């Protein structure tokens, strides 16, 4: 049951009526959004360091493998919870979206 504006509805006693399944899904979505944001930031930093020549070939290989595995794990977690990467992206209005696509 939701209110007229899509938010949680209020019962007769004035308390919020929350759907536990939706709250759990929304929490998972929020956590995965933060993890995806951190993953993207780490990837950008790693690419910058590689472009600057700050890492050895061996380190570059390890970074690439790690980032690839993190990306695959994010896909698995999204699938496990019935989410897509687009579900994780927050619209920040005039600033655009939170995550790169």
Image: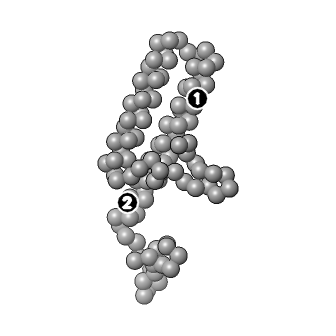
Q: CA distance from mark 2 to mark 1?
A: 32 Å
Can residue 16 be seen here? The reply is: no
Q: Position of residue 12 (x, y in %)?
A: 42, 87
Give the left or right position of residue 34, taking residue 93 as reference. Answer: left
Instruction: Sort mark 1 into few (<14), some (14-19) or many (20+) by Cα contacts within 10 Å.
Output: few
Q: Residue furthest right?
A: 94
Q: Report the front residue among 24 and 5.
A: 5
Q: Position of residue 27 (x, y in %)?
A: 42, 56
Q: Nearer the viewer, mark 2 or mark 1?
A: 1
Task: Please give the label number shown on residue 24.
Answer: 2
- Residue 90 vs 38, above or below: the answer is below
Q: Position of residue 64 (x, y in %)?
A: 46, 23
Instruction: Quickly name the residue at label 1.
Output: 45
The quadrant in which the N terminus is found is bottom left
**Mark 2 secondary-structure assignment:** helix
Instruction: Sort mark 2 into few (<14), some (14-19) or many (20+) by Cα contacts within 10 Å.
Output: few
Which residue does the image show at 56% across and 36% down from the upper left?
Answer: 41
- Residue 27 vs 11, above or below: the answer is above
Give the left or right position of residue 99, taking residue 83 as reference. Answer: right
Can residue 54 be seen here? The reply is: yes
Q: Report the front residue among 95 and 18.
A: 95
Which residue does the image show at 42% across and 35% down from the upper left?
Answer: 71
Q: Residue furthest left?
A: 80
Which residue does the image show at 57% across and 19% down from the upper left?
Answer: 50
């Amino acid at each position: 049951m939701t209110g007229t504006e899509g938010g949680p509805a209020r019962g007769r006693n004035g308390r919020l009526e929350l759907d536990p399944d939706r709250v759990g899904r929304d929490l998972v979505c929020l956590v995965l959004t933060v993890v995806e944001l951190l993953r993207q930031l780490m990837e950008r930093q790693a690419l910058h360091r590689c472009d600057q020549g700050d890492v050895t070939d061996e380190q570059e290989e390890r970074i690439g493998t790690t980032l690839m595995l993190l990306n695959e794990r994010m896909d698995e977690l999204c699938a496990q919870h019935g989410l897509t990467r687009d579900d994780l992206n927050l619209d920040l209005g005039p600033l655009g979206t939170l995550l790169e696509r």
